[in-house]
Amino acid sequence: MTATRFSSGYVGRFAPSPTGRLHFGSLVAAVGSYLEAHAHGGRWLLRMEDVDAPRTVAGAAEQILRQLSAFGFEWDGPVMTQSGRLDFYREALEALRAHGLVFPCACSRKEMADSTDSLLARDGSRRYPGTCRPGLPSGREPRAWRFCAPAGELAWLDGVQGEQVEDVARDVGDFILLRADGQFAYQLAVVVDDAAQGVTHVVRGADLLDSTGRQIALLQALGKTVPHYAHLPVASNAQGEKLSKQTLARALDVERPEWFLWQALQFLGQEPPAALQQVTLPVLWQWARENWSLARVPSRRAQHVDTDAGL
Ligand code: GLU
């Protein structure tokens, strides 16, 4: 952990969900956020996003830490773990409730699916039709808590993908902050934690671009500073599917970190010289730190990788 390099107020972070081991897609997000933080003389924090308890896999967080260490990443300060922060999420929900910005919702998934009012949201999921926003229908029990999505367009400049505009009320609708199973939603946890950690710059995969409008709306409602966002292309396989546990992405091989790092730099448009495929991990990191440029990252949402080559 190098203490000398913090010459700025930049705070970046990497926030994996411990649902399995890291794969090439996660490495891309780790490398991009890490190098961008270094380029700004900033701090790079690590957060285990295990807020979704049913999806969390025992031992995965430890495996991720081992993988990151084997790849030569150095994070600043202690690792934040969401499962230990439920009181803060409750507090944020309570603050929103005090301002009348959340409401209890009785709708089941089936009722929503059957509703003719519910249009599709931008990410293809069903948009909440607003049934319970005026008040719970009589005799119904609350299941979840939803955020009153603000009407109107939000605009922001993404560091890689450029100008973004989203109307959260129209494109997503009132979204869930506390689920029917009692779990806090990722959208709430991520903004509470980014604010608590003082994150100034979020660099992550473009699969989360469609979550950004929701997160900005929530941060504004909570009176928190909105960080800068930069969304890196997501690694996809030949079928165009995002590399993930569901698409059986290979775990990063800790025996060959240099090979994977070189591939991640290439994926991120940094054009590492071929000769650097023969060098040691510290030498490759040094080149990466000296040559990193966010401007060279392709402004695409997704980019294919050759999974047959071992990625
Ligand atoms: N935990 C999320 C994931 O692994 C990332 C959240 C974020 O970077 O904002 O997909």
Image (cartoon, rainbow, N blue to C red):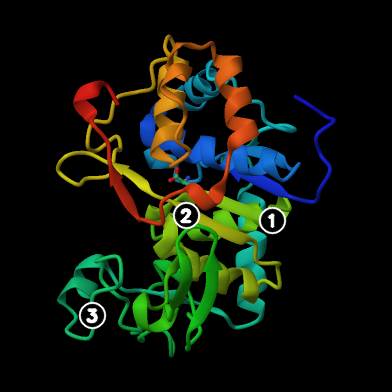
The residue mark sitting in front, 2 or 1, is 2
Query: Residue 294 vs residue 134: left or right?
Result: right
Q: Which residue is mark 1?
A: 200
Q: CA distance from mark 3 to mark 2?
A: 26 Å
Q: Where, quadrant-wise, is the N terminus in this rendering?
A: top right
Looking at the image, residue 289 sits to the left or right of residue 214; the answer is right
Disc 3 under 8 Å from ligand 1? The reply is no
Asked if the residue at tag 1 contacts the one at tag 2, i.e. Cβ–Cβ closer than 8 Å, the answer is no
| Residue displayed at 64% across by 69% down | 94
Mark 1 near mark 3, Cβ–Cβ under 8 Å?
A: no
Q: Is residue 122 visible?
A: yes
Question: Within the image, what quadrant is residue 269 found in?
Answer: top left
Residue 103 appears left or right of 45: left
Quadrant assignment for the C terminus: top left
Q: Is residue 156 above or below residue 311?
A: below
Q: Which residue is mark 2?
A: 231
The residue under the point 50% across, 45% down is 51
Q: In this rendering, is residue 170 above or below 123?
A: below
Specify the amino acid type for callout 1.
Answer: Thr
Q: CA distance from mark 1 to mark 3?
A: 34 Å
Indicate left or right for 108 with 103 as reference. Answer: left
Q: Nearer the viewer, residue 40 or 53?
A: 40
Per the image, label 2 sits on a secondary structure element best described as strand
Query: What's the amino acid at mark 2?
Result: His
Give the image quarter of residue 125.
Answer: bottom left
